[in-house]
Image (cartoon, rainbow, N blue to C red):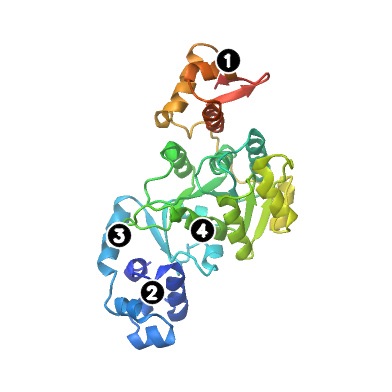
Amino acid sequence: MTKEDLALLFVRGLGSRGAAHLVDHFGTAEAVYGASLHALCDDAGLREAIAEQIVAKVGFEEAEREIAYCRKHRIVPLAATDDDYPEPLRETPDRPHVLFVRGSIDALHGNMLSVVGTRDMSPSGLHVTNMLVENLASRVDNLCIVSGLAYGVDAASHRAALANGVRTVAVIAGVLPEVSPTAHNALAEDILKHGGALVSELHSATKQRGIHYLARNRIIAGMTMGTLVVESPASGGSLATADMADGYGRTVMAVPGRATDSSSFGTNNLIRTGKARLVLTAEDIMEDMGWCSMPRKEVVEYDVTSGVTEDALTPAQRATLDAFDSAATLDWPMLMGATGLTMGELSMVVMELELMGLIRTLPGKRYERV
């Protein structure tokens, strides 16, 4: 990593593909900044307005500030030319030239699998996620689960990895060291504590915009050789991630569901169109990825609920939990009466609390606090 690597991030109009093209053409960011205007424009095909910025050393001051910011927050910037940069991601044409990493750099290498899906995960989706990660953890050495730290399948896959003693990497769409959603702050810290990493392509001067989420998905797709979609409606971010993985020539896998379940429309269509391979078991994933069964080296004990802090709960989540102060178990009408939430609002809150491991479903559609 050099100052020139960081400086490229601040060249207006260059972008990820432009930076990747220039570094591929000249070999290093230092060579890019050492090139003449003629070489940048005529040889590398760069627009003159962008080339003039590079010749004028635009980005150097910002790079100095970024270096200081990274030191302050214990963030490691990795350039695509660094040995520790994830090799599968290095092969993509729109790779981020710099990744900002908190945590273990070693977590960016190994038998890595991206696991994505809907934020509105069903109990069945949660069960399948836990089952597949648990069975992979017992069979695949140096396994690492990559996802996006969002609600639903993302958070469930991170927690399943931690619960089974394997590392996990969260790719976020914001500026480190902050994470989003803030309700997952404790989960993010547990990822770091157990040898995982938080990754972003955004430098400290980036203004938060919704487009960063779609851009984040290409990193999730590109960082691994395989992407598993657990549940997805007919459209959504997880399908975009699957499309990107397919475009990179990576293995795309999907868990099928019932034809009447809207949360399975996307995954079923991936399988129907031949874009994804059908997955029912961990063995299916291992076969598709070409992984051999090996003994695990180490198991780290982890409580799946330890990544949840009740201080970060929303008012609706807090009201629902507080309702259990009046009774050990509650049914649906009792919860609606105690919280004042509508059916739709309560359904979402109950699902979120179940995924956080704070309540669980009992027979007869009753709930209890964990």
**Residue closer to the observer: 283 or 36:** 36
Q: Which residue is mark 2?
A: 29
Q: Are marks 4 and 2 in contact (CB under 8 Å)?
A: no
**Residue closer to the observer: 300 or 50:** 50
* Foreground disc of the pair 1, 2: 1
Q: Which residue is mark 3?
A: 66
Q: Is residue 355 visible?
A: yes
Residue 13 percent location from the top left of the image: 37, 70
Considering every residue shown, the one lying at the far left of the view is: 61
Q: Which is nearer the N-term, disc 1 or disc 2?
A: 2
Mark 3, secondary structure of its residue: helix
Q: Which residue is mark 4?
A: 219
Q: Which residue is mark 1?
A: 329
Q: Which is nearer the N-term, disc 4 or disc 2?
A: 2
Residue 64 percent location from the top left of the image: 26, 63
Mark 2, secondary structure of its residue: helix
Q: Around disc 1, counting alpha carbons within 10 Å, would you say few (fewer than 14), some (14 to 19), or many (20 or more)?
A: some
Give the CA separation, mark 4 to mark 1.
43 Å
Classify 230 as above or below 27: above
Which residue: 46% across, 55% down? 105
Give the CA separation, mark 4 to mark 3.
21 Å
Quarter of the image for residue 182 reads: top left
Classify 41 as above or below 50: below
Residue 330 percent location from the top left of the image: 57, 16
Three-letter code for the amino acid on which mark 3 is drawn:
Glu
Mark 1, secondary structure of its residue: strand
Q: Which is nearer the N-term, disc 3 or disc 2?
A: 2
Quarter of the image for residue 300 reads: top right
Three-letter code for the amino acid on which mark 1 is drawn:
Thr
Mark 4, secondary structure of its residue: helix
